[in-house]
Image (spheres, rainbow, N blue to C red):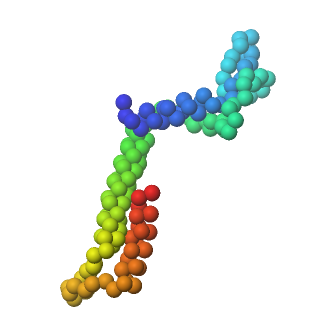
């Protein structure tokens, strides 16, 4: 079974479990139960929803998703996985740059002419602060 479908169904059932339940008698005299009583019928609430939960919003035919919806959900999940992978890679690069700058060794860079130069103290401090900010951004 598709992982996205399992997640969606789990969320739907979890929302239904937290919804307010009602009891009413239909026009045939039968006792009915549900989370939404029919209009014009006097319904009795059975229990209050747990504190801090809102009644679940009804989505028409939420369980009957078509192939387009499943494809969109897969694309969304793939994009989220790509973003997570890119964030992990960026975190690794940022940590490596920070380790290099914190190593205490002289750090060299290459200018636009292709010539190597060493960072002065002010440049080193500026790059160190930038590297720490990058680690904080990408690794949290």
Whether residue 65 can be seen here? no
Q: Residue furthest front?
A: 104
User: Horizontal and vertical percent for residue 127?
Assistant: 38, 77
Quadrant of the image containing the N terminus: top left
Which residue occupies the foreground of this view, 116 or 27? Answer: 116
Q: Quadrant of residue 67?
A: top left
Q: Residue furthest left?
A: 114
Q: Residue at x 34, y 54 (%)?
A: 85
- Lateral position of residue 3 relative to residue 118, left or right: right
Q: Residue at x 43, y 41 (%)?
A: 69
Which residue occupies the foreground of this view, 39 or 51? Answer: 51
Q: Quadrant of residue 126?
A: bottom left
Q: Is residue 136 above or below residue 73?
A: below
Which residue occupies the foreground of this view, 37 or 21? Answer: 21
Q: Residue furthest right?
A: 42
Q: Quadrant of residue 112?
A: bottom left
Q: Residue furthest top?
A: 29
User: Horizontal and vertical percent for residue 46?
Assistant: 73, 22
Q: Is residue 67 above or below residue 32?
A: below
Q: Is residue 94 above or below residue 106?
A: above
User: Horizontal and vertical percent for residue 140?
Assistant: 45, 57
Q: Residue at x 66, y 23 (%)?
A: 34
Q: Is residue 47 above or below residue 11?
A: above
Whether residue 135 can be seen here? yes
Q: Residue at x 28, y 76 (%)?
A: 105
- Lateral position of residue 68 relative to residue 53, left or right: left
């Amino acid at each position: 079974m598709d992982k996205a479908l399992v997640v969606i169904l789990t969320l739907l059932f979890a929302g239904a479990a937290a919804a307010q339940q009602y009891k009413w008698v239909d026009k045939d005299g039968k006792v009915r139960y549900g989370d939404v009583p029919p209009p014009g019928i006097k319904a009795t609430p059975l229990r209050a929803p747990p504190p801090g939960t809102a009644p679940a919003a009804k989505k028409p035919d939420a369980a009957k998703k078509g192939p387009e919806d499943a494809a969109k959900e897969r694309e969304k999940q793939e994009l989220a996985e790509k973003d997570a992978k890119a964030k992990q890679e960026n975190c690794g690069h940022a940590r490596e740059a920070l380790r290099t700058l914190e190593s205490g060794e002289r750090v060299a860079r290459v200018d636009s002419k292709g010539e190597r130069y060493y960072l002065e103290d002010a440049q080193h401090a500026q790059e160190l602060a930038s590297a720490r900010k990058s680690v904080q951004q990408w690794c949290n």
